[in-house]
Amino acid sequence: MTTELRRLRNYIDGEFRDAADGRTTEVIDPTTGDPYATAPLSAQSDVDGAMAAAAAAFPAWRDTTPAERQKALLKIADAVEERAEELIAAEVRNTGKPAGLTRSEEIPPMVDQIRFFAGAARMLEGRSAGEYMEGLTSIVRREPVGVCAQVAPWNYPMMMAVWKFAPAIAAGNTVVLKPSDTTPESTVLLAEILGGILPKGVFNVVCGDRETGRMMVEHRTPAMASITGSVRAGMQVAGSAAKDLKRVHLELGGKAPVVVFEDVDIDKAVSAIAEAGYFNAGQDCTAATRVLVHESVHDEFVAALAKTAAATKTGQPDDEDVLYGPLNNANQLAQVAGFIDRLPAHAKVEAGGHRVGDKGYFYAPTVVSGLRQDDEIIQNEVFGPVITVQSFTDEAQALEYANGVDYALASSVWTRDHARAMRMSRSMDFGCVWINTHIPLVAEMPHGGFKKSGYGKDLSGYGFEDYTRIKHVMTSLEG
């Protein structure tokens, strides 16, 4: 007996549509490895249609007042809250995440972030108008950039969709958003929610694969391309956008250092770091997965972390005792396992290091010690439930190791010494430095990195301004 698959569709110009040529891809349930839905495999004609709809909707949406855009976003936030259980169910099917944690850790910040950008729409700042040259008055206008092509990742499909569409729409832009080909369902449901509130064409969703994303970025219509993804994908987007000088917003990979000094409470630090490292199966660019520990407490820390890892559970979405679910897809499972398989002889697996079960893409909470700075697993992003531990001798070496990677998104320092925390936070080359905590984000503060972690900011007023352009208007006082 064959189970009928769910049928997902694109959302273009206010209506749901199949791909023009009828092609689809299967969407896999990561808890089983079996298909549960189909989604459009969009081609050039589908992208053209979405871009045309967004371009046609832009003039009217651009000319709405900030108050009107705020009102629409507040309605969207209310609707997301009202339909939270539907969104959670879709996200769980997409990702296999624990339902309870999705309810408590994703829906509230999503709603809060939409409401923040609703307020930001009415709080644009700029230089004071004035006479900077005799007889002439200057005014600075902030305007929306136009149509935005946005590509979201599979690790937080719903939340990353919010991070992209909320500031863009609040600023007066129109959007064509592509979810990952492995996690389109919750984004398609968001399109249904937004479609009942926004004018047609303001928000469009195009499903598809990497080729679909390439078509969107290379399309002549968008004024801006925004992607959250891998460094490789970011470089490709930047290269494609350079051909016609599109603005680019890139939030890419991370390899967050977690610097633990000898004066911390080891048990408390281990508990917090393990949760920040294993949450969402470590599939987070900011995850606390590269720990640097002072040599005097290294062995104690490793023993405590291995014990915590052994007690950490992965499992099905409806199991309230699990911290995380499966890895997102078969390729990601193979990538994580490959890092462990290729460990050098001097490395030691203290906990985990293996797949869990024979169905789905579950991987055990893992701890690896004995590593050196130039090891592959230290230099490259694993994006899985794997925490590495290195030792350092002093503050200078801690900084050398912390900054000694190509990524520069997030980091944390663990110490009771305030002056040391301030020195470290000043010198650590990362877009975010947490002190005695790791991973909390708030809508009011910017999120974004340096180096190969990309450029541009999500969240905050800075993220809002990224979706605007600046125009100088000068007028003669003589008439």
Image (tube, helix red, strand yellow):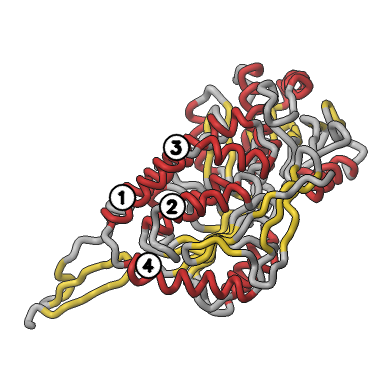
Q: Residue 251 or 59: which is nearer the viewer? A: 59
Compare marks 3 and 2 and give the one earlier in the sequence. Answer: 3
Based on the displayed image, in which of its 4 quarters is residue 210 positioned?
A: bottom right
The label shown at residue 166 is 2
Residue at x 55% of width, y 29% of height: 437
The label shown at residue 71 is 1
When the figure is inspected, residue 331 is found, relative to residue 236, above or below; the finding is above
Which one is in front in this view, the residue at disc 1 or the one at disc 3? 3
Amino acid type for the residue under numbered disc 3: Glu
Q: Which residue is denoted by mark 3 in the rendering?
A: 82
**Residue furthest out toward the left:** 478
Compare marks 3 and 4 and give the one earlier in the sequence. Answer: 3
Q: Which residue is denoted by mark 4 in the rendering?
A: 469
Which one is in front in this view, the residue at disc 1 or the one at disc 4? 1
Q: Position of residue 344 (x, y in %)?
A: 89, 41
Which one is in front in this view, the residue at disc 2 or the one at disc 4? 2
Q: Residue 185 or 235: which is nearer the viewer? A: 185
Compare marks 1 and 2 and give the one earlier in the sequence. Answer: 1
When the figure is inspected, residue 61 is found, relative to residue 338, above or below; the finding is below
Amino acid type for the residue under numbered disc 1: Lys
Amino acid type for the residue under numbered disc 4: Arg
Which one is in front in this view, the residue at disc 3 or the one at disc 4? 3
Q: Residue 132 or 25: which is nearer the viewer? A: 25
Compare marks 1 and 4 and give the one earlier in the sequence. Answer: 1
